[in-house]
Amino acid sequence: MSMPEAPLDRLRAQCWSSTGDLLYFNSAAHGLLPDCARIAVEQYLTDLQHGASEQEFSPAVERLRTNLAQWVGCADADLAFCQNVSAGLNIILRGFAWEPGRHILLCPEIEHPTLIWAARALDPLGVKVRTVPAPRGQVLAEDVVAAMSDETQMVALSAVSYLSGGRIDLAKVGAACRQRHVFFLVDAAQSVGFARINMKEQFIDGLVANVHKGLLGLAGLGFLGVNRQWLPHIRPLVVGQESVDSRQEPWQWADSARRFEVGHRNSVAAVATLASLELLGSVGIDAIERHIVNLRHYLVNCLMAENLRVLAPDADSHIVAIEPHQGSAAELVQALSARGVKAAARGQYVRFSLHAYNVYDDVDRLLDIVRRDNLR
């Protein structure tokens, strides 16, 4: 089996310096924090101890805005910071100019509960939820397009399912939405940092993500990108010093996605993520995605050889979900944890998730543990 390229080795060394023999397969919950991000946080705290003000970190926050915009394929002015994905989804869904009798289309079978709850909470506004199936944990673009109708006002999907790892053809769905003037909202929490995503090229009108998973940052900072043409159709629900262009009367909303920002941003998470992005950028998203996808296929083949059922086995993503033969998913995750393997239980499934710092030897060691202790 070929070894990772040198840049991947450097990234791995940055992320595994303090983990010992831990086998970490939980990047879909939280990416490992690299040394460079930890050092950036330590410097941030030192600066605070020496009297630095929040405003002094604004340049770092704005550099992060520029970098994130490049990672997701939008203009700086079209990207706003928020607390997390849940906040970003609600900013768009609650502020959207819904029309009576229209509906939102999504896939509850493999969608994150946050999006499902946020969509169902629109019921008092007269917004209905329509669904598409996900056979074997994979929603197909053609099924989404076929389910669209004259009443569809928004399509909301995850680029990669948090549960199955199923990955949808965003460009195909986005093109159909653009043709019908339907807003295309993408939850990119399990995509940014793991795989290439581009709002412009894939016709995405709204994108929401966080920085603590694929981007190896800290929890508590998210962001949303909004197609400039749709800004007038999304009403900000709160107002603060960051969301207006003028503090004089008459005031007006900022002529950019900043209208969705309220007050101080999470600057400590920003400086950590900025350092992590520099590290990830030295590898390149194409090399990261290629390594992750190849490693996933290797892991899937190994697990299927053990007669374990894998959701979305052919998906090109970082997530692998299996259904245990015996006991619950939570019990199997606990047993793996006792043996130095970090995974996650999601419903009835055990979820393994990869990043560029994982290598083939990690998978081989995992399979040795599974076989040795009959953990199925």
Image: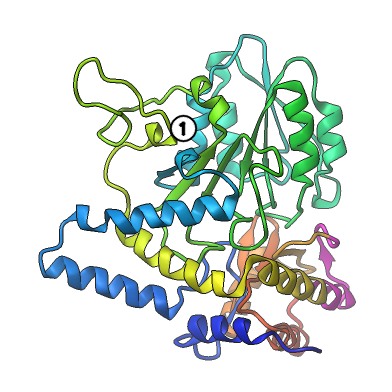
Does the magenta portion include 232?
A: no
Picture residue at 36% right of the left edge, 75% below the top: 38
Q: Give whichever of 188, 320 is nearer the camera.
A: 188
Quadrant the C terminus occupies: bottom right
Residue ID for mark 1 = 91
Is residue 210 visible from the viewing direction of this image?
no
**256 left or right of 104?**
left
Does the magenta portion include 312?
A: yes
* Vertical side of 69 occupied by 14: above or below: below
Picture residue at 74% right of the left edge, 83% below the top: 370
Residue 308 picture quarter:
bottom right
Q: Residue furthest top?
A: 100
Q: Which residues are magenta?
A: 300-314
Q: Position of residue 258 (x, y in %)?
A: 39, 36
Disc 1 crowd rating (10 Å Cα; few below 14, some 14-19, many 20+) is: many
Is residue 257 visible from the viewing direction of this image?
yes
Q: Which amino acid type corresponds to the residue marked 1 in the rendered image?
A: Ile
Residue 220 picture quarter:
bottom left
* Vertical side of 246 occupied by 6: above or below: below
Tag 1 secondary structure: helix
Q: Give whichever of 311, 333 is nearer the camera.
A: 311
Q: Position of residue 299 (x, y in %)?
A: 78, 75
* Vertical side of 287 occupied by 89: above or below: above
Residue 113 picture quarter:
top right
**153 left or right of 180?**
left
Picture residue at 73% right of the left edge, 42% below the top: 109
